[in-house]
Image (spheres, helix red, strand yellow):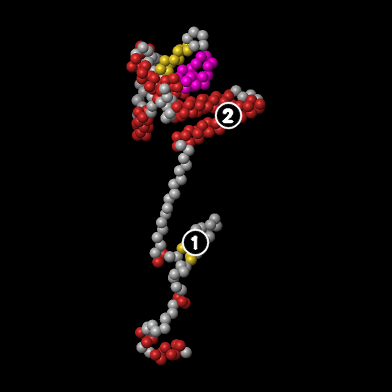
């Protein structure tokens, strides 16, 4: 019998293309909608110069467009918008705050700074005060993540655990306080209380008020419903005829029956 031909080892087997579901399509559409509305912080590229100096270039003024005046204006506009619309000097100061919080082992990591810029843009500061607070929040979150990593991977003694754990708790509280401060600043410190008035109309037929509505306790024994009688409803024993009122026709027709009943 003839042997079957075996495919070459390096041959690539075709794979069926991925077929997104309806939920996948909805998630993709929502993603593009958010990206359309989200501010564009721009990307920065950090290059080390002589000594400790670094060169920072903001997209789109990168590479061949580094000397393009139009690209430079767009880069400045994106950066200042990210920090709440401050001027160029204020944006540089806040950008340095993010860079200084970057782990420097092996040099400044521009990817880390770009991720921090994206988080500041997600907070969407509206002025310089919110821009400064947003930078503090992002830097505090970076420290929280670093301490959590140390707690999991680097702590070897109880003393280290106590030291890192205490600092981590304080940073978590600080981050929560920063969020509350941002909320108060954006709302002007106002506290709004909504009061809803509910009007209930009860007619004469439904004047009884249920004090304890029927329900079942744990053993399945029902609770008896209790009602209160309205004071304007006369009881049967209180129904009398005033003097001079005509008697019902049945009693008026037989006066002897009236005297017998009265006696």
Q: Examine the structure image and report whether residue 102 is included in the region drawn in magenta.
A: yes
Residue at 47% x, 12% y: name it.
54
At mark 1, the secondary structure is: loop
Measuring from the top left, give residue 14's x and y in whole percent.
Answer: 35, 21
Q: Name the residue under label 1.
A: 211
Residue at 54% x, 55% y: name it.
218
Measuring from the top left, give residue 11's x and y in whole percent.
Answer: 37, 16
Measuring from the top left, give residue 33's x and y in whole percent.
Answer: 35, 31
At mark 2, the secondary structure is: helix
Which mark, by number, is residue 168?
Answer: 2
Magenta residues span: 92-111
Spot the residue most to the top: 50
Spot the residue most to the bottom: 256
| Depicted 96 relative to depicted 134: above or below | above
Residue at 38% x, 22% y: name it.
77
Q: In which quarter of the image is residue 61?
A: top left
31 to the left or right of 140: left
Q: How many labels does the image show?
A: 2
């Amino acid at each position: 019998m003839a042997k079957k031909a075996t495919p070459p080892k390096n041959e690539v087997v075709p794979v069926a293309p991925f077929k997104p579901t309806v939920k996948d399509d909805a998630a993709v559409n929502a993603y593009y909608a958010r990206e359309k509305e989200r501010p564009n912080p721009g990307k920065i590229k950090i290059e080390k110069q002589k000594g400790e100096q670094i060169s920072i270039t903001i997209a789109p003024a990168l590479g061949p467009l580094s000397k393009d005046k139009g690209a430079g204006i767009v880069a400045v506009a994106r950066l200042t918008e990210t920090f709440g619309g401050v001027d160029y000097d204020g944006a540089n100061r806040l950008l340095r705050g993010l860079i200084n919080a970057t782990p420097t082992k092996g040099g400044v990591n521009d990817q880390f700074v770009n991720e921090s810029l994206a988080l500041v843009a997600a907070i969407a500061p509206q002025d310089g005060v919110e821009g400064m607070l947003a930078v503090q929040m992002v830097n505090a979150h970076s420290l929280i993540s670093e301490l959590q990593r140390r707690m999991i991977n680097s702590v070897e003694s109880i003393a280290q655990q106590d030291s890192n754990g205490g600092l981590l708790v304080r940073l978590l509280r600080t981050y929560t306080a920063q969020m509350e401060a941002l909320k108060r600043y954006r709302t002007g410190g106002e506290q709004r209380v909504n009061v809803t008035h509910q009007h209930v109309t009860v007619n004469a037929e439904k004047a009884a008020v249920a004090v304890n509505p029927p329900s079942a306790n744990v053993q399945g024994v029902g609770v008896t419903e209790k009602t209160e009688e309205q004071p304007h409803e006369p009881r049967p024993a209180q129904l009398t005829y005033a003097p001079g009122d005509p008697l019902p026709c049945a009693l008026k027709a037989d006066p002897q029956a009236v005297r017998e009943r009265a006696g």
